[in-house]
Amino acid sequence: MLQLWAAVLRQPFATALAVTNLFTRLSAGAVALALVLLLQHERGSFGAAGFVAGVFAVGTAAAAPIVGRLVDRTGQTPVLLVTAALHGGSLLGVAARPSAPLWVLAALAGVAGAARPPVAACMRGIWIAMLGEGAQLRASYRLESALLEVGFIAGPVVAGAVVAVGRPALGLVLTAGLAVVATAAFALLPPAPAWRPAPRAARAGVLGPLRAPAVLSLVGSRAALGVAIGAVQVAAAAFATAGGRAGFAGVLLGGFAAGSLLGSLGPHVTPARFTLLSAAMALVLAPLLLPAGLWWLAGLFVLAGAPLAPLNALAYELTDLAAPPGTGTEARMWTSTATAAGAALGSALAGAAVDGAAPRAAVAVALAGAVAAAAVTLLTHRTVTAPGEPRRPASGGGGGLGQRQQDEEAGVAGA
């Protein structure tokens, strides 16, 4: 896998694109914690801080498919630059006036979430245009999943460290600045302006990619998997608190992300293994129900994360294959939104379960989400994988950056 990643990164501008993409992932991983730390410090209320962070998440979930459709209609660079300005400006507004009325902060956070730059979805569109079909494109999906885990691990650490050594507002200011600068740099690299949307399928209609049964299946399975991910985050905090070491939650979650990162280094598996990997996710969560000390739990969290990156990579690949022509970016935003919404639901359900029982109740919620995700993939696997049917990813061309993708409606699974 490392050799394939090296081959991918040798493409023109590929390393610069990956680096700027990584910096936007770091910002995305840090922003929620930066918001909470600043507002709790200034207002003395975790409730207020959590409310504003929640509005940010809702804004992201609600607007992401709309932003994706704009990219598919107008191209990447204009949307990236506008969203970066709105996202960064709104976060800086919160940092400048954290004592403002709560509704003002919530409004700013909602705009910041809604305008979250869709760099990751755009990056995958560029990979398709740049790499064509084959092993390198599949390796790029693993690379994207690995970057996600690096951002998840390092983003909160960076935010916490900055707040610890400086003023609480500094974490949010740096998070906003990083998002703006990295997104602008990505948007102005030649592959982004050169990317062109594929002609939109005539039958896409108002629903766009949601008209494809395969995309609907992926949205359902990603939402269920999101429940598992959100519940795992609560489980980590609950285990650490019950063990008398609340700070150990970071070690547990870091282990989960590290396991996923290690999983991204394994060999590529075909889309036909999507159901198998979904079932594996449920299996590796089950040992967290066993009684164990915190350090043993850390090892079990590493094991629990191992299937996540390859599962994410296959979901990326299948989403791009299932989306009708001209709707690739929007389809990616739908699946990412489903995952985020599922994670929010999983966190809420797990929190309520832990309040009424024990930390392992959160694991039960996570396991239920993973089992539901596996059930969805099992029941719809023929729709999603369409074995034996040649297909091309539904995305735009590269304007000379690689072979232009000629998407054909007849070859799109589930369209």
Image (tube, rainbow, N blue to C red):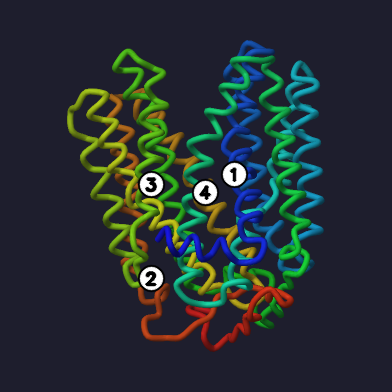
81 sits left or right of 241 in the view:
right
Decide which of 111, 132 is in the foreground and name it: 132
Which one is earlier in the sequence, the residue at label 3 or at label 1? 1
Task: Name the residue tied to disc 2.
Answer: 271
Q: Residue at x 35, y 18 (%)?
A: 241
Residue 127 percent across, percent down from the top left: 59, 67
Secondary structure under the numbered disc 4 in the rendered image: helix
The amino acid type found where label 3 is placed reads Ser
Q: Residue 147, labelled with which disc?
A: 4
The amino acid type found where label 2 is placed reads Pro
Which one is earlier in the sequence, the residue at label 4 or at label 3? 4
Q: Are marks 4 and 3 in contact (CB under 8 Å)?
A: no
Q: Are marks 2 and 4 in contact (CB under 8 Å)?
A: no
Q: Are marks 2 and 1 in contact (CB under 8 Å)?
A: no
Q: Quadrant of residue 158?
A: top right
Which one is earlier in the sequence, the residue at label 2 or at label 1? 1
Task: Name the residue tied to disc 1.
Answer: 25
Which one is earlier in the sequence, the residue at label 4 or at label 1? 1
Q: Please state, as top left, top right, bottom left or bottom right, where the N terminus lies in the image.
A: bottom left
Secondary structure under the numbered disc 1 in the rendered image: helix
Residue 187 percent across, percent down from the top left: 75, 56
Q: Residue 260, labelled with which disc?
A: 3
172 sits left or right of 410 in the view:
right
Which one is earlier in the sequence, the residue at label 2 or at label 4? 4
Report the Cα–Cα distance between label 4 and label 3: 11 Å
Compared with residue 327, is residue 109 higher up or lower down, i.e. above or below?
A: above
Q: Residue 303, labelled with which disc?
A: none
